[in-house]
Amino acid sequence: VTEYKRNYREHMVREFLRDGEGDSSPRENPSIRSHYTALTIAREPWSWQGAEHGGVGCANTSNGPATVTAQTLFRPDEDGRTPRVVVLVGAPGMGKTTLVRKVMVEWGEGTLHEQFDCVFCIDCKSIALLKEASVADLVSQCCPHQRVLAGNILDDQKILFIFDGFEALRFSLIQPEAELSSDPREVKPLETTLMSLLKRTVLPEASLLITTRPTALQSLGRCLEGEYYAEILGFSAAMREEYFHRYFENTNKAEMAFRFARDNEILYSLCVIPIMSWTVCTILEQELCRKKNLLECSKSTTRMTMSYLSQLLKHRDRDNPQVLQRFLLQLCSLAADGIWKHKVLFEEKDIRDHGLDQPDLLPLFLNEKISKESGDHGKVYGFSHLHLQEFFAAMFYVLEDDEETVSDLVGHEKDVNKLLESYSESRKDLNVTVQFLFGLVSQKSIEYVDKTIGCRISPQAREELLKRLQGRHRGISHPDQGLKISELDTFHFLFEMNEKSFVQSALGHFSDLDLQDMKLTLYNQMALSFCIQQWAGLGCITLQGCSFHRQDPGVELDLRQEELHCPIHLLCRALRHPGSALRVLRLQWCRLSESCCAELAALLAEHPSLARLELGDGALGDRGVRLLCRGLRGPGCRLRVLR
């Protein structure tokens, strides 16, 4: 037995240090030792109360849930009770299997859960097709080359069984007590053997760790006693930064990538989901390999969210894409209905009404939530993140559908103009949905969705979006002045689409940019820079009272040293593009320092049409003014007015 346990530990370390799945890329399942980042896990000490209230799952307590780690899952709680059964709940992509890999490697190395003599990890997907098995058979599968003593090591040992992905076992867990086994070597139908472990009629002293999506909670709760529930909530802010640093081997690249994500509020918020953080890091790593910087990164938030979606669907059978397309359209209808009604939790009736009661697909997109507050309503469902609901709500307006699907839809009609009008007039909370809408109708998005997901996006909405942008600012421009744009979200929308020809068409009728009292984050500056470079008719820029968000020392999105620490670098670089017709630049009350003067001097020295520059309330200093004068003396300077 001692030799078996030693060999088994070594086998576990080798097995779980390897990539998780054979067809995964090396970056998808990296080394647990170097890349694993701790997750926020909330533990609830109460057990299932199935009979009276229809069940209790993972819900927040009044004082907030206690947090635990992989190391403390089986430690005594504040009342001194040691958990024997822990149910670890998490949505797809939240890191359940990665955490299990971490547990197995560290137990094998003797650094985690040392109270257990043996830890057996059973992948529920791999045993789902078994008809019969004993507990000893399940253990033998964990170490197929060491079958001889599988039964013997179950005697007089402290054992932890890990069932990973319990939702894959779709059979009934209701078994007559008389049929349950007490002998770990007795072969029974698989559901009976598993039920015997859960009901603790076999190996009653063993501990259990069960990972599952929320969909399996109700059936699990009926057959467990005294269990603890823990829910993976994802990455905290500090954990997100740590993950980026662990993913990238180069510190400078890690800081560039993290800064890029953090400055995009939507993207950063979505990175709470571990698989989304992985998706973003993977895409940004590819960008850095191609361009060495992220200042011109063309991968929008929409594109990264679509990459996340394709990750969720990549192992699903795609023989019938019509089923997926139909389901996605109905899911998007539910999402849009919820966005319009400020609704993030949906009852079972909502799921049925939208035709979403499909066990193969529903758990990929919606989390089942069963809480004390659910009362007579039973189960409720919600998206993993509000921004994902907003993404699917935007997809509702652009996914192509057939007449049969349309006739089954409930909720709102597909009226893009109504969505845009509501956003413009009163519903500013629709901002993220509208931004995703622009991203989805780009040509690259249309091609990507068709190729990776098998769904078709209608390009018809492009024309409606273009007309809306062209007419949006006409009413607020003064008759004696050129047409001006004075809302920053216009540039966010165009940057999200990231199509030069569309930007040129959208901005071609406007000549002035007027933004006041805004904090221009790096993301805002990137959006402005991209649009200004395509804006041939831009003649006047007024940025009054706007603050340029400075880079942290040493944290740059561009590796060229001469561009460090210039807050207006992106703006000036965009204005130096060939064909710029800018005549007036006003940077009043923008608190510009002397470091900006080198950029302004370079702009003055070579811009062929800039005739008026207005600065105010700056801290330029003598050195800054000298730099500015150097630009004024340049032979290419055409300036006529300096204030």
Image (tube, rainbow, N blue to C red):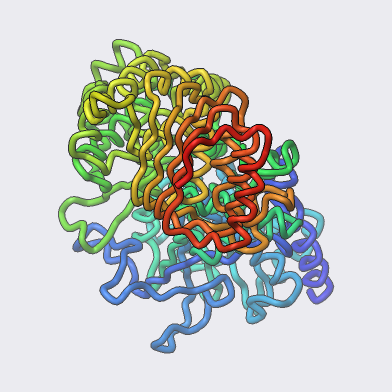
Q: Is residue 181 in sight in this rendering? A: no
208 up-or-down from 329: above or below: below
For the N terminus, the image quarter is bottom right
The percent coordinates of residue 183 (x first, y second) are 57, 66
Which residue appears at 51% of the width and 18% of the height?
Answer: 501
* Residue nearer the viewer, 503 or 318: 503
Which residue appears at 73% of the width and 64% of the height?
Answer: 33
Which residue appears at 26% of the width and 25% of the height?
Answer: 480
* Residue nearer the viewer, 449 or 4: 449
Residue sitting farthest toward the left? 376
* Residue nearer the viewer, 609 or 300: 609
Which residue appears at 81% of the width and 55% of the height?
Answer: 145
416 up-or-down from 623: above or below: above
630 up-or-down from 250: above or below: above
The percent coordinates of residue 590 (x first, y second) are 43, 54
Q: Is residue 549 in sight in this rendering? A: yes
The percent coordinates of residue 302 (x first, y second) are 48, 35
The percent coordinates of residue 591 (x first, y second) are 46, 58
Left or right of 36 on screen, residue 513? left
